[in-house]
Image (cartoon, helix red, strand yellow):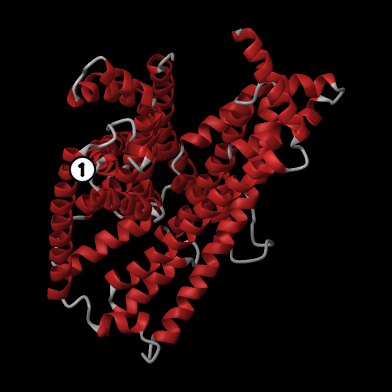
Amino acid sequence: MSSPTTSVLYDIPGPRARRRALIGSAIATVLLIVLLWLVIGRLADQEQFSMERWGPLIDPSNENFVQVWKLLGTGLRGTLIAATLAIILSTLIGTILGTVRMMTSGLARLPLVTLIELFRGLPVIVTIYLAYRVLPDLGVDVSPLPGPDGLWFLVIGLTAYNSVIIAEILRAGVASLPRGQREAGLATGLTNLQTMRLILLPQSFRIMLPALISQLIVILKDTSLAALIGLYAELLRSGRDIIGVLENPIQTYFVVAIMFIALNFALSRLAVYLEARLARGRTSGTGAPAPTALESGLSQTAMAGGA
Amino acid sequence: MSAITDNYGLFGHAFLRSLGICVWTMIGALSIGTVIAAARVSPVAPLRGFGTTYVTMVRNCPLTVVLFFIAFGLPEIGVNGSYYVFGISALAIYTGAFVCEALRSGINSVQAGQAEAARAIGLTFSQSLGSVILPQAFRSSIPPLGSVLIAMFKNSAVLGAFGVAGDLFSTGIRLTSAQGYASTPVFLAIGLAYLCITIPAGLILQALERRAVIIR
């Protein structure tokens, strides 16, 4: 089988299995086309393909085109600003929280563990709402910060949730490292903090990169929660505003969805690219000779043991 | 504090309502996720393509957008329903993609040698699938599946914020905006109610994970 996902389940197909797969493919294709046809037919019946509904989104000569895209552009900018701020803050605070949690022990760790467990268990919309409603009650004033207040409530809510998740991801990364990494660091005379900062955390970031990037995608997606409480002008809110005037929800939400999907897809591609780059850096970078020597040394001992 | 002591009954109802939403959503999401996972590991290329497209689209789209698309889009083509039904459908469609990935990661974690050994001792395709591969795949997919379901419970708050009446989050909004209670105690109580489910669920999951681990 060409696809690795199916290798456990199936043998390499012989002529009969190939024939069956071909017949199955034909039937599935027909069914999928029929399904698509039904959906399109339904949409066409209800005049969802009319230029009256699509025009403002796709036809540059439409009177509303410029304004619609200006609004979508503002929304996209809002989403990106909120996401960038939340991503930077969550990563910074998450790294600090994770480090402190790993470096303290016993009773000193308890308050932090409690905090992490509490925020991990709350829905993000609740943390955003808490930031929005409870912080002002506590006398926290975000108005000196640049940008609208709503932006900062959103960013604080997102950061409160995501920084503890990132702390846990980094902790899992450090836990997965071989013990010798830390021991070697301490043996060369580095302090605990130096070992963490120079040896353990960099490797943890590298190992956990896929998980970290998926968390960044979660942050980007969760910025749209602001639209539910009317907190901040981001992409989904722009979509709602457009629909309020043009009354074309299917078309506008379709465009908004595609924009989100494209952004997140690009982020996940970036993750794949970075992963490949980091892997390459590992085998051919400046640090290459040491691990290779180590590896060959290990395999020699393994062979010696085997013999 | 009167916000909480005055409204014990309301909080209780809201809690049950949130759980009810989750039971229906869980049934939907597990069904959708299983079907899509089956499509993604099938030897039929068009089905694999369909499954991959579904997962890529849904996973990269915010739940709120899926929700708005369904709740405001479907009535446009003549499909009418309550916010309750639309909300549950949207959450099930969204969670389904994550369920699919959890199940698939379980199948992928089974080593090819297991299937080879099963065939070598003469098991048929359905025997090796039913007594060798799927039991192991199921065990390895428990941890990711559990996290997906906990995330689903937390996401149900989004439905409340959207306007599905009666769940924990919407009750919080109702108490604070319509009935004028102070936000801080109400929303701390609402947060606590979510934690009552998510923290024990997380602990149970950890215990299950430890029991289900396969020693190879």
The residue located at (39%, 39%) in the rendering is B151
Where residue A204 appears, x then y in whole percent? 64, 34
Where residue A7 appears, x then y in whole percent? 34, 34
Q: Residue A59: which quarter of the image?
A: bottom left
The residue at which mark 1 appears reads as: A18
Quarter of the image with the C terminus of chain B in it: top left
- The foreground one among A1 and A201 is A1
Q: Residue B28: which quarter of the image?
A: top left
The residue located at (49%, 70%) in the rendering is A75
Quarter of the image with the N terminus of chain B in it: top left
- The foreground one among A276 and A221 is A276
The relative height of residue A1 versus residue A104 in the rendered view (above or below) is below
- The foreground one among A82 and A135 is A82
The relative height of residue A79 versus residue A163 in the rendered view (above or below) is below
Q: Is residue A45 left or right of residue B152?
A: left
> Considering the numbered disc 1 on the image, is that residue within a helix, a strand or a loop?
helix
Q: Can residue A242 be seen in this view?
A: yes
Q: Which chain carries label 1?
A: A
Q: Is residue A281 left or right of residue B62?
A: right
Q: In this view, which residue lies farthest toward the right?
A: A189
Q: Is residue B161 left or right of residue A186?
A: left
- Count of marks overlaid on the render: 1
The relative height of residue A263 versus residue A98 in the rendered view (above or below) is below
- The foreground one among A81 and A48 is A48
Query: Is disc 1 surrounded by few (<14), some (14 to 19) or many (20+) residues within 10 Å?
Result: some
Q: In this view, does A65 lie to the left or right of B16?
A: right
The relative height of residue A124 versus residue A58 in the rendered view (above or below) is above
Q: Residue A46: which quarter of the image?
A: bottom left
Where residue A306 appears, x then y in whole percent? 59, 9
Q: Which amino acid does label 1 sit on?
A: Arg
